[in-house]
Image (cartoon, grey):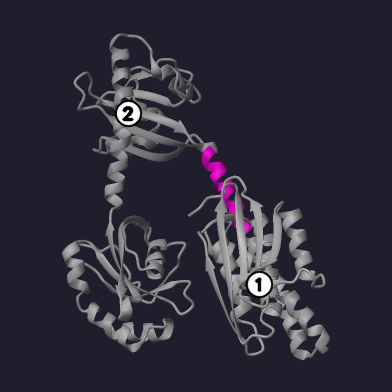
Amino acid sequence: MKNILEELCFLHTNLSKEDVLLLQELVGNLTLIADLNKANIFIDCLTKEGKHAIVVAEAAPTTTKPVYKKSVIGKFAYEAFEPSVLYTLRTGKAMFQNRAFTQEGKTVDQSVVPINGANDRVIGALIMEKDISEQIQHQRKMEALSEATETLSEILIGMTENRPIIPEMIEESLFFIDQDGEILYCNPSAINLIQEMDENDRLIGRSLVSYFPRIQAILNEPEELIIQEVEMLNKIFQVKKIKLDHFDKANGMFVIFKNITELRVKERELNVKSVAIREIHHRVKNNLQTVASLLRLQMRRGLPEESKVHFVESLNRITSIASVYEVILSNSSVDDVDIYQLLEKIGNMLVWESEHENKRIMISYSGPHLQIKSTKAVSVALVVNELIQNCVKHAFKAMNEGKIVVLFEQKGNDIEVQVIDNGEGYSPKSKPSLGLDIVRMLVEHDLSGHFSIERTNQGTLATVTFPVERGMDQI
């Protein structure tokens, strides 16, 4: 495992040899830690790009059943699925007892602590995962049983006194059957359900399974509470079975049918719609990248010097719009965009991946992970593209190095984005530029917001403020 760790670290991370040696020493104790805690143990490290993590070591416990059937060494951990791991790797702060889902669909209790190298620099994360799927299932059953107890007691009292109560009002079809499965009571909704199949009015004393053969397996299960979905009568029902053996007043069980056909149909429609929207986003992204590739091809074939800058600016605008769809496709939502991830992607593209006449330009970001709607994200992407591009192009003409800072935060009902540089400073007397005209137009018309740009003691401050849409959440 140590050789695999060394190979993965050198290929995918920026760790030094000393850091890798420290991790290799820790690997020797992983199995012991796994056995002591009866949990799976992993070591994840941040990749070179800093956007994902990679699993470089693992250990499964011999004292209990492992969480994973297959090895995950060499697998990437994405922030959308492992937020705690990426948070610890970036901040150095531990995260304890977070509920998470594995790639194999199990619910686990996850704790993450940082692994520090020289100068307390975070070089990796030690992760412990315990399978709590059965515990969660049992907890849900007990909660449902607890919620049902009071209603069931009232039902029994009402049956004893020969007076109808709550069951007459609920929409679910409710049956009370004895230990032999014969119907002792049914509410009006249950009677209507039976009459859809059989006009015979005499239901009391008849076997419930004779009407619904597919629930036989549910009735035979020994558990006190079972909730399953069953397809019958060309519909989908949520069937609940609640045994009452522990009640003093009655023995038997309640069987409750809830018609969820419409709900499942709508869910399927939403899933189909979600897949279609993601496919549209994917095609839009590919089309934009094709346009960008055509522009790059034309630039490589040669352009007049005075035209080159216009091609570069157009290329950056197209790539910034494409970034919106890349961020959407990397997340679980088809309509929301993480503004931190979006601005970081655009800023890095403009600063790190472009030529700046041998100038050393640094860029940093500060702000929470706010979600904005994709309809606004395109405008925000173009605005930030123009502001950062303006800094790169004009702020550091007489300087060998410069710094750009992108700040964003939510203030009440507004989101504020600031792009700050320590360059020569904006002059109100400068001739109008297409970039700033684009910014003003997008902010005022598309974002319904406000834009300002001013000179400061250190350089230039550009501020964009726009209202938050309903349903926007902060992670």
Residue 170: x, y in percent?
44, 22
The majority secondary structure of the magenta stretch comes to helix
Q: Is residue 194 above or below residue 321?
A: above
Asked if residue 285 shows in the view, the reply is: no
**274 or 203, nearer to the observer:** 274
Query: Residue at 39% of width from left, 37% of height from top?
Result: 214
Q: How many marks?
A: 2
Task: State left or right for residue 33 relative to residue 142.
Answer: left
In three-dimensional space, the C-alpha distance between marks 2 and 1, rounded to whole angstroms, equals 59 Å
Residue 228: x, y in percent?
38, 40
**367 or 124, nearer to the observer:** 367
Q: Quadrant of the N terminus?
A: bottom left
Q: Nearer the viewer, mark 2 or mark 1?
A: 1
Q: Amino acid at mark 1?
A: Ile
Give SS at disc 1: helix
Q: Is residue 397 above or below residue 64?
A: below
Asked if residue 394 shows in the view, the reply is: yes
Q: Which residues are magenta?
A: 263-278
Which residue in the structure is indicated by mark 1? 388
Residue 291: x, y in percent?
74, 75
Neighbourhood count class around disc 2 (C-alpha, 10 Å): few under 14, some 14–19, many 20 upward: few
Numbered mark located on residue 276 in the image: none
Q: Are marks 2 and 1 in contact (CB under 8 Å)?
A: no
Numbered mark located on residue 148 in the image: 2
Q: Amino acid at mark 2?
A: Ala
Residue 102: x, y in percent?
37, 61
Q: Earlier in the sequence, mark 2 or mark 1?
A: 2
